Amino acid sequence: MKKSIFFALASSLLVLASCSKEPASLPVMSFNVRCASANDGEYSWPLRRDAACAMINEHRPAVFGVQEALTSQLDYFMENCPDYAWVGVGREDGVSEGEHMSVFYDTRRIELLDWGTYWLSETPSEPSYGWDAACRRTATWTLLKDKEADRHFYFVNTHLDHVGKEARRNGLVLLVERIGAMNPEGYPMILTGDMNVYPDDPCLENLRTLMEDARQTAAQTDNDYTYHGWGTVSGTPPIDYVFYKGFSSCEKLEVIRQPYLGMKYVSDHFPVQAVLKY
């Protein structure tokens, strides 16, 4: 009789413990790495690449999207952040040429199920310029499985044009349409990117009807600037974002400003990390 009571009590405690378990947290990041071909003097890529890897290895995002990265930079991350893999294509030829808006994922926790890239243009299935854009612009999407939480989710990463207002507006219209259509299962979804616009820009309005802005909803947030131009710009509104849908909350949005390995800046943008809860 006593054994039966003991086992019944133990079972009840296990059920209560599982019911009270905190929802799993998912750290994700947007990181404009600054193109390796740029002549940035003391902040050129070969001088700061180890600092950039140290930042990733310290913050350990489960998934992160990069902007402006060349293949050589992606390869360096792979060599020095060994738990990660990436998918994406070069925006110039759809293979390897030019900047990538690639997605990295921690293979210990995340499984890649599917992915693709499209161009923010009138012909999204092929390398192309959109509207009044100065550059070809792309979005890379991934369908991922969080093995720790046993949950599927989509992660999309992009970089809007820095010149073309119509390209930014129409590019986001295309993104909103694609994001809305690609997820009939209703899985949680994340969008990261350098949007090249401030938070009050009208082009973000449609996106905000579909997804939450982590900067606006995080329990602990940071509304300060993200582009600093190697310390020449400060006090402006942020232009790097994390949007989400289908998560219960955002615990924290952090702009990562600290130096690494003696290097004051890991890029001309500060990385942005959000911690989401299922």
Image: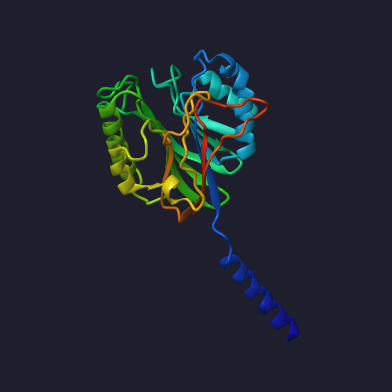
Can see residue 6? Answer: yes
Q: Identify the image quadrant of the N terminus.
A: bottom right
| Residue 9 picture location, percent across and down | 67, 78
* Colouring convention used in this rendered image of the protein: rainbow
Residue 262 is left or right of residue 195, and the answer is right
User: How many numbered circles are shown?
Assistant: 0
Q: Is residue 267 above or below residue 202?
A: above
Question: Residue most toward the front?
Answer: 235
Residue 123: percent from the left, percent from the top? Answer: 26, 26
Which x, y percent locates residue 27? Answer: 54, 44
Q: Nearer the viewer, residue 69 or 272?
A: 272
Which residue is pictured at 27% across the width and 37% down the height? 173
Q: Name the residue rendered at 32%, 43% in the picture.
A: 207
- Front residue (pair 235, 177): 235
Depth order, front residue of 234/56? 234
Could you say where residue 236 lies in the image, as x and y percent from the top left?
43, 33
